Image: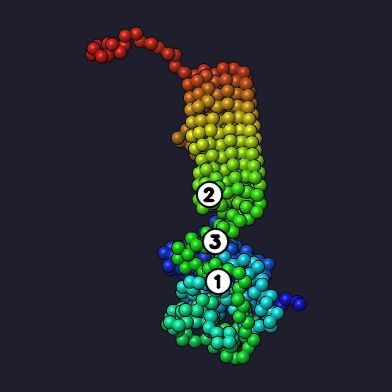
Amino acid sequence: MTTPAVQVMILAGGLGTRMKSAVPKVLHDILGHPMLWYVVEALKDLDAQPVVVTPEANDAFRVAFGSRLTYAVQPEQRGSGHAVQCGMEHVFAEYVLICSGDNPVPTAENYREFLDESVAEHAEAAVLTARLEDAGQLGRIVRTQNGAFVGIVEARDARPEQLGIHEINSGIYLFRSAELRRWLGEMKPNNAQGEYYITDCVSMAVQDGSRVHCSLARGAWEMSGVNDRAELMVAASLLQQRKLDHLFRAGVTVDMPGTVRIDWDVVVGRDSEIRQGSCLKGSTRVGTSSVIGPNTILIDAQVGDRTTVLASLVEGSTVGSNCVVGPFAYIRPGTVMDERSKVGAFCELKASSLGAGSKVPHLSYIGDASIAENVNVGAGTITCNYDGFTRVKHHTVIEKDVFIGANNNLVAPVTIHEGAYTATGSTITHDVPPEALGIARAVQVDKEGWVRRKKNGQ
């Protein structure tokens, strides 16, 4: 059977007042993407550039999605039927699949099964339904005693006996476009809200004797729409479980999964372990056989194989294979750690490179520095990269096989050449030659009897 031409329309024009937010409801973040992104992704094989009905102020939509969407404006909120009217000027296909931008949970398979089944039934109108034990404020599916579809009633317009129905409207519809245009023209706001409901078009199809297909979703239907922040968290938890299931099947261990957040786009290699209290966000990638956490945050980070990141924050940086980070390290954007390097407790690195086998073991700040291979940076060392006047950060270069003594201040711009040492407690203000010992500290002076005289007021 040849599938007829289908366009997708996503209703996203609601203001989401119950979210109590300046951000449009469907642009709220779930695991690193706007809620609407999940709907667009699930439908991309049906329509790569769906029509999305937005509020009039839709700049944020254009920033998030660019030309991936066709934008139709709903200038005022007058119900779902009015939103569809606003979008129909962009619909040219034989069929239009209509869904909600505030329901990120349905999968591509849900949409495809519904579409294929409805087209096979030669439906002129179709609605996807589901069964929920707690139907809440969702629209109810009304049927005759023999199960024939009658219509959909909104919860706020339903009679008490109708509120006891457990079959709900998922908010996903398919219409033959030509018929839908006629029904939209006949809509009337005969409801408690004085709004135009797209569900009325389904009822008109029944009244006209058109072929209406009412498809019950297979399996468990988890939710239908996000209206407030509590429901946003429910949607996030459902998608998080979906992401975790994928990782489990890929051979990843997640210790105490209820305590972690792993964004949708995060990739983790097999035999790696994500320990409790950790958060992996954005475009983070973790290699094989690595250990992340506990209590670690990775944001747009790249971590190699067999690397441990313990109780630390890594953002916008690359950590190579066989490395160790933490505990309590802060790896800031622009840092690159080569293989077998180490950043230890209470260290901060920013916009720096750390060569293979090099170590910054503890209590140091390394900013705007290039550190070559097999360098040891002593505890308490800092690179003094900012002079307090210019906006330019000055650069420190440490060549290979250098040993930096504890409690050093390296005043940039400065180069410590290959094989050199710097003495403990030094403030290095100029380049140290290869294999030299740089010493820059005051000479110790012992004043005999000073304490006794001080105590006696002398």
Relative depth, front residue between 43 and 63? 43
| Residue that extends furthest to the right in the rendered view of this protein | 1
At mark 2, the secondary structure is loop
- Which labelled disc corresponds to residue 256? 2
* Figure check: 86 above or below 43: below
Quadrant placement of the C terminus: top left
Q: Is residue 325 visible?
A: yes
Residue under circle 1? 100
Counting from the top left corner in percent of width and height, residue 11 is at: 55, 72
| Amino acid tagged 1 | Ser
> Crowdedness of circle 3 by 10 Å Cα count: few (<14), some, many (20+)?
some
Q: CA distance from mark 3 to mark 1?
A: 17 Å
Relative depth, front residue between 135 and 145? 145
**Which residue: 63% across, 33% down?**
340
> Crowdedness of circle 1 by 10 Å Cα count: few (<14), some, many (20+)?
many
* Figure check: 439 above or below 47: above
The disc, 1 or 2, on the residue closer to the chain's N-terminal end is 1
**Which residue: 49% across, 73% down?**
135
**Which residue: 54% across, 39% down?**
310
